[in-house]
Amino acid sequence: AQSVTQLDSHVSVSEGTPVLLRCNYSSSYSPSLFWYVQHPNKGLQLLLKYTSAATLVKGINGFEAEFKKSETSFHLTKPSAHMSDAAEYFCVVSEGGGSYIPTFGRGTSLIVHP
Amino acid sequence: NAGVMQNPRHLVRRRGQEARLRCSPMKGHSHVYWYRQLPEEGLKFMVYLQKENIIDESGMPKERFSAEFPKEGPSILRIQQVVRGDSAAYFCASSRDSPSVSNQPQHFGDGTRLSIL
């Protein structure tokens, strides 16, 4: 069985400061992991996805995430927040194999202050 | 290069009416997924379809809800005799390959916001 936990429902940062959005997962298989961003009244846009080739994954808009198997984590980071980063972020796990339907976290709302 | 297109963007229905939500996948994509999102919650999987076939409907309520993806035309999510609890945002996603292919991302539409009066 697979599950995903986003540890913070809201994260508030000032513009220009680092962003950390935390995600822990559980999976019976080698998982596929994704981060999506959702702006108000919009669909989800893929930020990045984990492949087994590299544990540090670079995505769009300066975001990156590090896969840590020992900690079962896939935290999303960005060195410097921009006002346009304010949105809802979802961590997603998909086991593959026989259970391929992804499981979404409850989301983390990123608030960016000027 | 159109993405996943959903319409209508907003739909208002009275209790007991029918709601029809449409989704046209990205060009070249033959796999379609429907999700429901309640306020301050993540997306909950409802159904996965490939052209003319329902592959997995394990997340679909047993009554009143149905989905199809005909050979021609968009995928349709149909909710009969709507109730207040059906109010939510419904998202459609598509992928080029089967979800059993690892690291297969899904591409999402902007959703249909369904409101039940």
Image (spheres, rainbow, N blue to C red):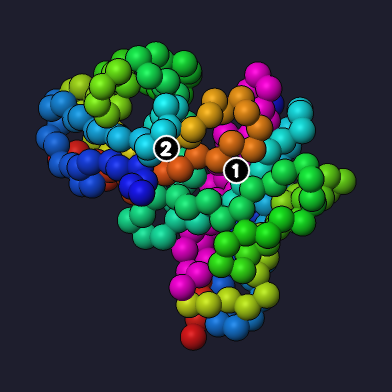
Query: Relative to A30, is A8 on the left or the right?
Result: left
Dot 2: element: strand
- Cβ atoms under marks 2 and 1 closer than 8 Å: no
Residue A76 screen position, x and y as percent: 66, 60
Assign the C terminus of chain B to one quadrant of the image: top left
> Residue flagged by tag 1: what amino acid is it?
Val
Range of residues picked out in magenta: A84-110
The image quarter containing residue B22 is top left
- In the rendered structure, find residue B37 and report the number of the disc placed on it: none
- Residue shown at 39%/50% (left/top)? A43
Q: Which residue is painted at 66% across and 32% down in the image? A: B102
The correct choice, above or below, for B6 with respect to B49 in the image is below
Q: Are marks 2 and 1 on the same chain?
A: no
Q: Which residue is mark 1?
A: A92
Q: Amino acid at mark 2?
A: Ala
Crowding around mark 2 (Cα neighbors within 10 Å: few <14, some 14 to 19, many 20+) is many
Query: Is B100 drawn above or below residue B10 in the view shown?
Result: above
Residue B93 is tagged as 2
